[in-house]
Amino acid sequence: MTNEEIAADMISLIRRYAIGSALISHEAKIRQAVDKLKHAHNFSKQELNWIARMEKYLMEESVLNVTVFEEDGRFKAQGGFGKINKVFGNKLESIILELNEYLYDDGGKTA
């Protein structure tokens, strides 16, 4: 488990006990975040395919950031950040940030 994964788990626990957020599964949080992201944009079929890969990655890992696209073989083998970023019109970094915001933006209702 990486430091980022430990931090993400700690944030969930703190939210749960500090503000009374409901604890939901890792998978449910990811599905909700991806759904919000999809509804906020009009993604092309190719972009949706990459979003699905990101979702699958997050089901196995706790953190998605720019370096993952250069270090993880699932993305690196497909051209890494540079190539995937072009698919998203050079907005991949903001898409990643938005997705991560959705993962933890719950209006204080879930952790």
Image (cartoon, rainbow, N blue to C red):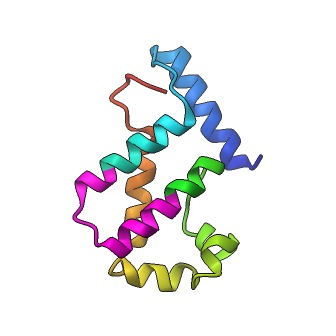
Tell me, yes or no, whether the highlighted magenta stretch contains residue 3: no
Q: Nearer the viewer, residue 93 or 28?
A: 28
Say above or below: 34 vs 44: above
> Is residue 48 at least partly visible in the picture?
yes
Q: Is residue 49 magenta?
A: yes
Q: Residue at x 65, y 50 (%)?
A: 60
**Where are the magenta residues, as a range?**
37-54
Q: What residue lies at 73% left-to-right and 47% top-to-bottom? A: 3
Instruction: Determine which quarter of the picture holds residue 66.
Output: bottom right
On the rendered structure, is 82 left or right of 99? right
| Residue 102 image offset from top left, x and y in percent | 39, 45
Q: Please tell me whether residue 106 is drawn above or below residue 57 in the rendered image.
A: above
For the point 77% across and 46% down, the residue is 1
Residue 87 % position (x, y): 38, 81
Is 76 drawn above or below residue 5 in the view shown?
Answer: below
Q: How many marks?
A: 0
Q: Can you see residue 62?
A: no
Position of 50 with respect to 1 (left or right) is left
Q: Position of residue 76 (x, y in %)?
A: 64, 79
